[in-house]
Image: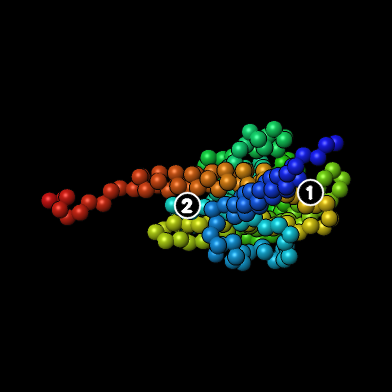
């Protein structure tokens, strides 16, 4: 093969540019919507995977109180309220997800040890429940008969924000049990970003819509000048 002058230099430069872009994109999708403070802060459930090999923290501001957002978190799961994301994509994989557009009373009770399925018969379990504040799930998905090659936690945390708003902070943590687990988790986390971003918007839209309906249904208070 004839040597092309400068080809190796250009190849190295191109490879370096691609790697730099990939690094920036990875940094962005692992912390979409989250502030530096939220990324660094400790959240309930961090102790489940104390030395995470990969952690993603994402967040959204919701114009509703934590008590108004919590019911949508409490009913997460297949066979329950769904995940408020791209149902059609999840159902292409046979997950049978149907995201609810209303709060269902019988789905509001959640206890430690309860299953929150990703698909019929499979999913993580509840590790921590702090009603109105935090729901933490734990446990990975087996690969056939093989147990998950990683430990996993998934936290949903509600924090009060100014002007009667709420920050919903969602964190995933993975601890690798096999060297090759990174080859599985890294591509999955790209998909997780797409689905999680949609989920955060889905929860936000539902909670804000419900809050708006309640506010609109309340009788308007008139001032003394208006009564005169």
Instruction: Specify the quadrant that holds the N terminus.
Output: top right
Report the residue marked by disc 2: 62
Residue drawn at point x = 67 percent, y = 58 percent: 55
First in residue order: circle 1 vs circle 2: 2
Residue drawn at point x = 48 percent, y = 44 percent: 205
Given contact means CB atoms under 8 Å apart, are the residues at marks 1 and 2 in contact?
A: no
Residue 152 in view: yes
Residue in front for this viewpoint, 193 or 130: 193
Residue in front for this viewpoint, 14 or 32: 14
Quadrant in the rendering for residue 191: top right
Classed neighbour count for the residue bearing mark 2: other residues with Cα under 10 Å, few (<14), some (14–19), many (≥20): many
Residue in front for this viewpoint, 98 or 181: 181
The answer to whether residue 188 is above or below residue 134 is: above
Q: Position of residue 34 (x, y in %)?
A: 55, 57
- Protein image colouring: rainbow
SS class, disc 2: strand
Relative to 25, is 119 on the left or the right? right
Q: Position of residue 54 (x, y in %)?
A: 71, 57
Residue in front for this viewpoint, 82 or 37: 37
**Label ID, residue 223:** none
Relative to 54, is 59 on the left or the right? left
Q: Position of residue 53 (x, y in %)?
A: 74, 59
Camera-side mark, 1 or 2: 1
Residue drawn at point x = 63 percent, y = 33 percent: 88
SS class, disc 1: helix
Residue 68 in view: no
Quadrant in the rendering for residue 144: top right
Q: Position of residue 124 (x, y in %)?
A: 72, 51
Classed neighbour count for the residue bearing mark 1: other residues with Cα under 10 Å, few (<14), some (14–19), many (≥20): few
Tag count: 2
Marks 1 and 2 sit apart, C-alpha to C-alpha, by 34 Å
Report the residue marked by disc 1: 183
């Amino acid at each position: 093969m004839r040597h092309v002058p400068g080809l190796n230099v250009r190849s190295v430069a191109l490879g370096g540019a691609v790697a730099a872009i990939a690094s920036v994109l990875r940094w962005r999708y692992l912390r979409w919507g989250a502030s530096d403070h939220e990324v660094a802060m400790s959240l309930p459930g961090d102790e489940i995977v104390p030395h995470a090999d990969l952690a993603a923290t994402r967040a959204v501001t919701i114009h509703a109180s934590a008590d108004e957002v919590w019911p949508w978190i409490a009913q997460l799961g297949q066979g329950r309220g769904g995940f408020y994301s791209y149902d059609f994509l999840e159902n292409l994989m046979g997950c049978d997800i149907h995201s609810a557009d209303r709060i269902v009373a019988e789905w509001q009770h959640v206890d430690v040890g309860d299953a929150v399925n990703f698909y019929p018969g499979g999913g993580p379990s509840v590790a921590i429940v702090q009603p109105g504040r935090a729901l933490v799930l734990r446990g990975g998905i087996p690969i056939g008969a093989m147990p998950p090659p990683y430990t996993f936690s998934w936290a949903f945390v509600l924090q009060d924000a100014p002007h009667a708003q709420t920050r919903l902070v969602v964190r995933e943590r993975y601890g690798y049990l096999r060297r090759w687990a990174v080859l599985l988790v890294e591509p999955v986390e790209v998909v997780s970003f797409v689905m999680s971003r949609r989920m955060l918007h889905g929860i936000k839209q539902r909670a804000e819509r419900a809050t708006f309906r309640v506010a609109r249904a309340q009788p308007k208070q008139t001032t003394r000048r208006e009564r005169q």
